[in-house]
Amino acid sequence: MDRPSTWMQPIARTVALVAGFALVLQLALIVGQFAGRGEGVGAALWRFFGFFTILSNLFVCIVAAAMGLRAGSPLARPWVRLSALVAILLVGITYSIALRHVWEPTGWQAVADHLLHDAVPPLFLLAWLASGHGTLRWGQVWRALLFPLAYLAYAVARGAYDGWYAYYFLDPGKAGWDGFAAAAGGITVAVALGAAILVAVDRWLGGARARRR
């Protein structure tokens, strides 16, 4: 295993701050929207925590804070960093491919939108690249699947409960169960492939840096 770069912690702290600001901003916007419809904070929070984007950015915010404050924290373990990175890259890529054309946010909503989808993913990738490498194993790829698969189950359960789905391609009523299965299968394959690529990069970086010493 090689040691993290000296600039890993400053980058990680920046990621935590950016993600934290974006999450607070988005929450404030949702609370304001719900208040405008006469609905309370509880309903706004329920909606807020229904998005994979929100949960993934929260995951990254926690992991990045751990990396930035104490690199040896259990929350900054290599497989945890891998899981957070795969989740946030999935957010950025899926948004660009399937969701960016659906709406055009303006004002503060556009700021929150770009921070959550466009800024945090590459920033956290930089923090990950600057961290220590060489300890991930192929058998840990499955761990990166846990967070997205848990969200899929959570999204279906929420939708069955109140009829609201955060993403159209996860709504069996709109996409059909075949469409939902195709989306879930595609996400699973993409996450597994992405995690495998990142494990390969981790092992290569660990070996390359060790050889330079």
Image (spheres, grey):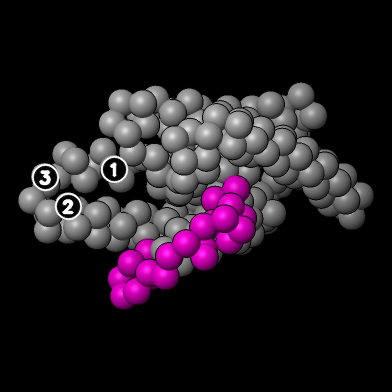
Q: Nearer the viewer, residue 169 or 97?
A: 169
- At horizontal 86% and vertical 46% (from top left) the residue drawn is 204
Residues drawn in magenta: 90-112
Q: Quadrant of the N terminus?
A: top right
Check disc 3 and report the residue beneath it.
40
- Asked whether residue 1 is in view, the answer is no
- At horizontal 64% and vertical 35% (from top left) the residue drawn is 182
| SS category of the residue bearing label 1 | helix
Check disc 2 and report the residue beneath it.
34
Magenta stretch, overall SS: helix
Check disc 1 and report the residue beneath it.
47
- Asked whether residue 200 is in view, the answer is yes
Q: Earlier in the sequence, mark 3 or mark 2?
A: 2
| Mark 1 surroundings: few (<14), some (14-19) or many (≥20) residues within 10 A | some
Query: Of the residues shown, which amino acid type is indicated by label 3?
Result: Gly
Q: Are marks 3 and 2 in contact (CB under 8 Å)?
A: yes
Q: Nearer the viewer, residue 176 or 72?
A: 176
Q: Is residue 50 left or right of residue 35?
A: right
